[in-house]
Image (spheres, rainbow, N blue to C red):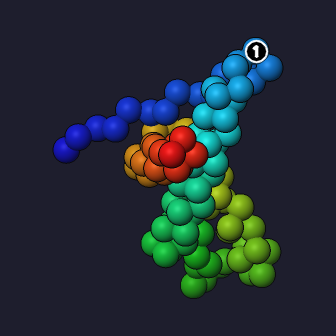
Amino acid sequence: MTTIPALPPPRGQAILPEFVQGDAKLRDAAQKMEATFLAEMLKSAGVGAPRQSFGGGAGEDQFASFLREAQAAEMVKAGGIGLAQALFEAMKVRMDG
């Protein structure tokens, strides 16, 4: 299996040229899209689903989405599944072309 390297963190935008700032915004958008996708996949996998017995009730249902979103964001920080990089490259081509 091929490992996908983690995306480098965006640099400070105040000192970067305009084209690099645009890349940072595109990369951020791509990472947010990957996190949203992963959160939905975690939801489909049953992460955060209420337990049958001794569950947390309505509060658990409402806050489970926050847990999934936080887990997905951490997965993206750790390198994710490569979706952010593919999205970034596709958006970059569209913006440049």
- Residue 35 in view in this figure: no
Which residue appears at 57% of the width and 84% of the height? 52
Q: Give the answer, above or below, for where 90 lies relative to 6.
A: below
In this orientation, which residue lies closer to the viewer: 16 or 35?
16
Along the line of sight, the residue nearer the viewer: 33 or 91: 91
Q: Quadrant of the N terminus?
A: top left
- In screen coordinates, is 29 left or right of 2? right
For numbered disc 1, what is the local secondary structure? Answer: loop
Q: In the picture, residue 67 is in which quadrant?
A: bottom right
Q: Tell me the crowding category of disc 1: few under 14, some 14 to 19, or many 20 or more residues within 10 angstroms, Cα based.
A: few
**Where in the figure is residue 55, as x and y percent of width and height?**
66, 77
Report the side of 81 relative to 49 (left or right): left
Q: Residue at x 59, y 69 (%)?
A: 48
Can residue 70 be spotted in the picture? yes
Q: Residue furthest front?
A: 97
Name the residue at 51% across, 46% down: 97
* Total labels drawn: 1
Q: Looking at the image, is 28 positioned above or below residue 38?
A: above
- In the displayed structure, 29 sits above or below 15; it is below
Would you identify the image quadrant in which residue 18 lies? top right
Image coords of residue 47 (percent x, y): 53, 68
Up the image or down, 25 lies above or below 65; here it is above
Q: Which residue is mark 1?
A: 15
